[in-house]
């Protein structure tokens, strides 16, 4: 979970390059249980 969330966060920051936003990704399974979370990164963090 954490590795996927971190990879998704990094890809999001690449797409949003230059935008003044922070990105935090949370992965949940179909039952709604959190299975992974990334740390917050970006200029607004």
Image (spheres, rainbow, N blue to C red):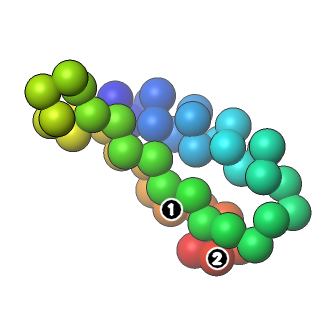
The picture quadrant where one finds residue 31 is top left
Picture coordinates of residue 19, whole percent (x, y) = 80, 65
Q: Residues within 10 Å of mark 1 (few under 14, many from 20)?
A: some
- Residue to which mark 2 is pinned: 44
Left or right for 36, reference 4:
left
Name the residue at the top extreme. Answer: 30
Name the residue at 87% across, 63% down.
Answer: 18
Residue 5: x, y in percent?
Answer: 46, 37
Q: How many badges with numbers are in the image?
A: 2
Q: Which residue is mark 1?
A: 40
Local secondary structure at mark 1: loop
Q: Residue at x 21, y 39 (%)?
A: 34
Vertical arrangement, residue 40 with respect to residue 29, above or below? below
Horizontal side of residue 29 vs 10, given as left or right: left
Judge from the rendering whether residue 29 lies leftward or rightward of residue 23; answer left or right: left
Callout 2 environment at 10 Å: few (<14), some (14 to 19), or many (20+)? few
Which circle marks residue 20 in the picture? none
Left or right: where 30 falls relative to 8: left
x and y percent of residue 23 in the render? 57, 58
Residue placed furthest toward the right = 18
Quadrant of the snapshot with the N terminus:
top left
> Which element type, helix, strand or loop, lies under badge 2?
loop
In the image, residue 27 above or below residue 43 = above
């Amino acid at each position: 979970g954490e590795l996927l969330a971190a990879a998704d966060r990094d890809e999001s920051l690449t797409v949003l390059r230059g935008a003044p936003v922070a990105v935090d990704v949370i992965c949940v399974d179909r039952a709604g249980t959190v299975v992974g979370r990334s740390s917050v990164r970006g200029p607004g963090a």
